[in-house]
Amino acid sequence: MTDEPQGLKITKLEPEKRQGLVVVITGHGKGKTTSALGMVLRAAGHGMKSVLIQFMKGDMYAGEWDGLKLLGDRVEHYATGKGFCGLLGNPYSREEHRANAQAAIVLAREKLSSGEYDLVILDEINNARHLRLVDTGQILELIKIRPAAVHLILTGRDAHPQVIELADTVSDVQEIKHAYRKDIEPQPGIDY
Amino acid sequence: MTDEPQGLKITKLEPEKRQGLVVVITGHGKGKTTSALGMVLRAAGHGMKSVLIQFMKGDMYAGEWDGLKLLGDRVEHYATGKGFCGLLGNPYSREEHRANAQAAIVLAREKLSSGEYDLVILDEINNARHLRLVDTGQILELIKIRPAAVHLILTGRDAHPQVIELADTVSDVQEIKHAYRKDIEPQPGIDY
């Protein structure tokens, strides 16, 4: 339920010019993927269609797998990866991780060019580049082939300066503190 | 739809100890409210229940008003405000803004104590405090009365140091650049 204000003039914005934005959410703090999920939710409310392609993620269940299904056909979600490459305990080779990330680039190119989506979200792609699973040039190419009406959202720590240069809106989510440093385990609904 | 990975062992985390976290998302960059919305979506996927109380917001339609409805009874949403106090063109007096924010504090206290919600999100409360529509002591009291199992998420720029001190996870979303500085109008799905 939404409890909308009563007896108040509600403004409904509509830009004179609609245009797609390139948005980068980077940095080491909590809130990058959740911010992208929030934009998907917001867009769904406007009746817009999103596709979320997650790089590296795919070996670990997260609430968004089911949460996004609640948005029905306004979102497609692809978890393409096998976990964080190089992270302690991850059993897959760099070659396997790179093959997955490269397949995700092909998928991203296809979705971006299809004209079927208002938002294309490439979650963790900046981090995948930092880990050399995708190349900087591949991200720059995706930005360049983006149709002007499509929003392209790129998340993940360590965004490349050239990617930041091409973006319209860039946030750096800095970690002031994080519960895991107090040895608090990841909690559902917040951390996954 | 969610395209889940095939032929891959999927880990389902479950913490030995579930505990509520106090999460603060502050800073001047884009991505605070959307991050909170993303946590609501994630929690809904886990079957958890959220209540989102927005301070100051309420006079302007945003996609989340309808997006959150798609999550059904897993979320309650209250837009309690009359816009950003002091912002050019906002016609309401400081007293009116403060009365609304104070009513939202009462609502927050009630929801937090009710035991009905897994997540309580107080959107823009840090900003409301900075604008002196709520008092620092009122936020500290909410943190202190929070049942241990409940996640409390506080968003908005200019979080108070004492609030940060009591929180478990704190992110500072810094603005590297923002489309509006290039005179690009707010775009649906991204900015509202």
Image (cartoon, coloured by chain):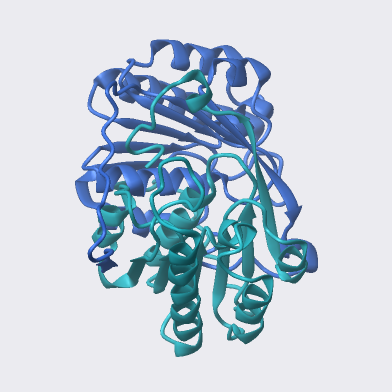
Chain colours: A cyan, B blue
- Foreground: B31 or A192? A192
Residue at 50% x, 76% y: name it: A105
Splitting the image into 4 quarters, where does residue A70 fall? bottom left
Position of A190 compared to A87: left or right? Answer: left
Q: Nearer the viewer, residue B4 or A176?
A: B4
> Which of the 4 image quadrants contains residue B162?
top right
Residue A49: image location, x then y, percent: 39, 74
Relative to B142, is B175 above or below? Answer: below
Across and down, in percent, residue B89 comes to 70, 52
Count of numbered circles on the image: 0
Quadrant where the C terminus of chain A sits is: top left
Decide if residue B12 is in sight here. Answer: yes
Q: Which residue lies at the image location 40% right of the left edge and 58% below the top edge?
A: A41
Percent coordinates x, y for residue A132 in the rendering: 61, 63
Q: Is residue B123 left or right of residue A138?
A: left
Q: Is residue B135 at all visible to an observer of this figure? A: no
**Residue A48 vertical placement versus A144 (above, below):** above
On screen, residue A62 versus residue A23, left or right, reads left
Q: Residue furthest bottom?
A: A114
How far across and how far down the image is residue B122, in percent?
A: 46, 33
Is A7 in front, or is A123?
A: A123
Q: Residue at x 41, y 38 (%)?
A: A191
Query: Image quarter for residue A75?
Result: bottom left
In the rendered image, the vertical position of residue A144 relative to residue B143, given as above or below? below
Residue that appears at 53% across and 21% down: B167
